Amino acid sequence: MNAPLTLRRLVLAALLAAASSSAWAADPVHDAAAATLPEYLDLLRLPNVTRASAADIQRNAAWVKAAFMRHGFTAQLLDDGDTPMVFAQLGDRHARKTVLFYAHMDGQPVTPSEWDQASPFTPVLKAKDASGAWQALPLDKLQGGAIDPEWRVFARSAADDKAPIMMLMAAADAFKAAGKAPAINIKVLIDSHEEGGKPTLPDVVQRNEKLLKADAVVMLDGPMHASNRPTLVFGHRGVTGFKLTVYGARGDMHSGHYGNYIPNPAFGLARLLTAFKDADGRVLIPGFYDGVHFDAQTLAAFAAVPDDEAALLRRAGVARHDRVGDNYQQSLNYPSLNVTAMAAADIEHPRTVIPFEASASFDIRTVPATPGARELALVRQFVEAQGYHLSDGAPTDAERAKYPLLASIAGGEGAAPLQTPLDAPIGVWATKALEGAYGEAPVRIPMMGGTVPTHGLVVGLKSPILLMPLVNADDNQHAANENLRLGNYFMGVKSLHALMAQPL
């Protein structure tokens, strides 16, 4: 290694970081963001797992409502049983278009023992040391001094999705500090059921349609592109889940006494699984990909996303990707069929038995051309074509006597995909705003792989929807040690301020 060159690079990086900190310090948008950090930490201290405690969600909702009001919004709770949602509003000028911003205050369940801190709901500020390990810093470093954009706050929902809630308030504060008003009317809906429990957003939207009505919807959820450049997402996959069970004997059978005589359903399930896909990962079910076509504009949009696929494969620890699409973006625009869990007998306490049943749980990630109900019907037809009789739950004695191959498919619930045209006015508006703020075009992703609850908003409000993720891609969302890069907090406020300053 060229030591002098490496030293020069380190010095240059330090100078750039110092220049960046100085520029931020003189920026009123940065100042507004920094001022909200103590409130952000307070919000993270509130446990927010909907399935664990309705009372916790009530406390989050009350806190969020009060916070919006402190920052100049009008705010109210929207009835949602024991777990209310929060609505806030800023500006109501008829000459200006209205944008509804969506985020959620609930989070994924936690296993505290998996976290590298005392509690997932006690936020910890950390920085990397020379060896690359995360070391805790005093939280008071976030008050009054220069903030390193590479510092991170670790806590449940630090990124997904409490940070955007506070970013909205900070962006509004920057207008107030400058004595100006946003160029749009702003509405905000904070969901309480995005991460778990019965999805109630469609009902809440239907009951509050007039209140929530907007010219466009911007959803502040999901991670930014891995490059950490400002990101716009124009669609997302849907999801349909189901469970496939293959049946054998009425109960577990002794593998010595009955091996070679009683069929083993685990092997039957395995044969079905291998029939579903080829060695390149392509689904072999007839018609599964029907309707998926890409025009030249869409293919160009895929190619324009600056993915580092070699780095993606290294991070995943695999030598090659499935051959469904030519690249990562194209792959996301096909429907997928994934096994999410498998079971036969007791893997933790194995016994010498032939299990009486074997099952696998699946999700089908759908795209607009491949609705979930159709895809699940194709799966059922395919299983039947392999010689299986599909029973309604556990087979009856009559079915056991008649059919040598027995299975059932349960489930089918899910969420719909979304696809907003790349040239839609909402996309033009957001692109122009971010170009003005950053001096370069944002990353424009046609379809992200995850699923967010847009369907209730689409049906209830009939407004165009765009996703603008604001948090770092390596945030460990849904996992232990979830975190937010502080540079992304300030970028998020800057991006939201830019949108609010751009007439729709």
Image: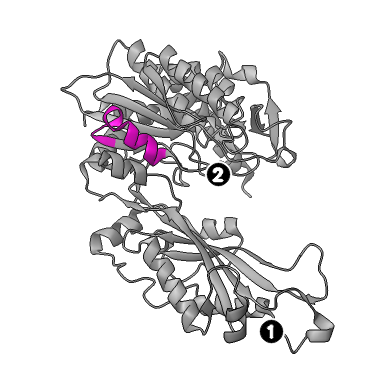
Query: Is 222 placed above or below 212 here?
Result: below
Q: What is the quadrant of the C terminus in the image?
A: top left
Disc 1 from disc 2: Cα separation: 46 Å
Q: Position of residue 465 (x, y in %)?
A: 30, 42
Q: Position of residue 79 (x, y in %)?
A: 43, 28
Q: Position of residue 38 (x, y in %)?
A: 56, 18
| Mark 1 vs 2, N-terminal side | 1
Crowding near pointer 2: few (<14 within 10 Å), some, many (20+)?
Answer: some
Q: Which mark is residue 62?
A: none
Nearer to the camera, 357 or 21: 357
Apparent side of residue 387 relative to residue 203 in the rendered image (left or right):
right
The region drawn magenta spans 201-216
The question of residue 205 being in magenta is answered with: yes
Q: Nearer the viewer, mark 1 or mark 2?
A: 1
Secondary structure mostly seen in the magenta stretch: helix
Q: Which mark is residue 263?
A: 1
Residue assigned mark 2: 474
Residue 96, image quadrant? top left
Can residue 487 be seen here? The reply is no
Nearer to the camera, 346 or 449: 346
Q: Position of residue 269 (x, y in %)?
A: 61, 76
